[in-house]
């Protein structure tokens, strides 16, 4: 797929819930018009600020499982009791004219990595420590106490998978984090090779 310097990028951004991934992906799309966010399908109920077709394609479980059975997803996962997945058709269309950023978890990243024709840049975002994550989840005010607890608990499982990624960014400050993300993208835009390491930053 990527044979010259101008080929489009597929950037995966994963993190434990609440680290700032959604803010970063949105900022990237606003600042860098070449980037489109991959809009996943999910069976989760929309939050009050979310719009169908923009934040997610909200579908019921039946529709999701039908798409899965028909092999329409590049990847899918069950997370916090809901299904999430990336539709092949959307990615294949999008990558023709745009770079794509994926806000997906480690399970999806593993599955996408199995498609050897997809040249991915995998970035893992973490907070400095667990307490910082808990503060962020509380401040975000989008989840019930129970949901916050579940998301917090999944932190240990999530960070076990950091070594599957090409780059790790520690989110101490969102602006710095964004600059690092831009730097990674810039580096990969001008490189021909597809195996990278955070050591090259
Ligand atoms: P949220 O419910 O907070 O929007 O997302 C919960 C988790 O699901 C986040 O870690 C997010 O990255 C992940 N996620 C969102 N869409 C997808 C997807 O299509 N596939 C996978 N594997 N994970 C996703």
Image (cartoon, rainbow, N blue to C red):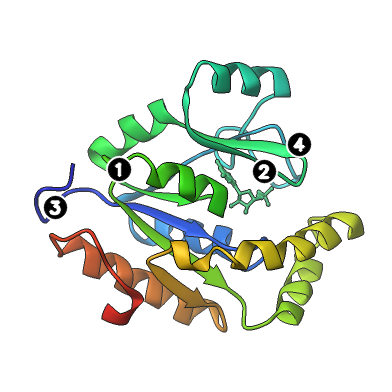
User: Pointer 2: what residue?
Assistant: 50
Q: Between disc 2 and disc 3, whose residue precedes?
A: 3
Tags 1 and 2 in contact by the CB under 8 Å rule? Answer: no
Q: Give the position of the C terminus as an image quadrant.
A: bottom left
Query: Is the CB of the residue bearing disc 2 within 8 angstroms of ligand 1?
Result: no
Q: Would residue 201 be seen by someone viewing this image from the given angle? A: no
Labels 1, 2: front one: 1
Residue 161 in percent (x, y) is at 55, 63
Helix, strand or loop status at disc 3: loop
Q: Residue at x 58, y 73 (%)?
A: 126
Between the C-alphas of marks 1 and 2, the distance is 29 Å
Tell me which corner region of the image, top left, top right, bottom left or bottom right, holds residue 18.
bottom right
User: Pointer 4: what residue?
Assistant: 45
Q: Is residue 105 above or below residue 159?
A: above
User: Pointer 3: what residue?
Assistant: 6
Give residue 118's mark.
1
Query: Is the CB of the residue bearing disc 4 within 8 angstroms of ligand 1?
Result: no
Q: Is residue 47 left or right of residue 184?
A: right
Q: Residue at x 73, y 60 (%)?
A: 154
Q: Between disc 1 and disc 4, whose residue precedes?
A: 4
Pointer 3 local density, CA inside 10 Å: few below 14, some 14–19, many at least 20: few
């Amino acid at each position: 797929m990527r044979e010259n310097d101008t080929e489009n990028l597929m950037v995966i951004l994963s993190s434990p819930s609440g680290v700032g991934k959604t803010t970063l992906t949105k900022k990237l799309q606003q600042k860098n018009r070449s980037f489109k966010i991959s809009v996943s399908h999910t069976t989760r109920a929309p939050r009050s600020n979310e719009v169908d077709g923009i934040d997610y394609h909200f579908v019921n479980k039946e529709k999701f499982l039908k798409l899965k059975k028909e092999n329409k997803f590049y990847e899918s996962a069950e997370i916090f009791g809901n299904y999430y997945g990336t539709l092949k058709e959307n990615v294949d269309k999008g990558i023709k004219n745009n770079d794509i950023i994926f806000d997906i978890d480690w399970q999806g990243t593993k599955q996408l990595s199995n498609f050897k024709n997809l040249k991915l840049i995998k970035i893992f975002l973490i907070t400095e420590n667990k307490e910082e994550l808990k503060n962020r989840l509380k401040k975000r005010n989008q989840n019930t106490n129970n949901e916050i607890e579940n998301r917090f608990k999944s932190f240990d499982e999530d960070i076990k998978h950091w070594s599957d990624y090409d780059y790790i960014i520690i989110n101490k400050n969102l602006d710095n984090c964004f600059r690092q993300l831009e730097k990674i993208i810039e580096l990969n835009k001008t490189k021909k090779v597809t195996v990278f390491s955070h050591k090259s930053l």
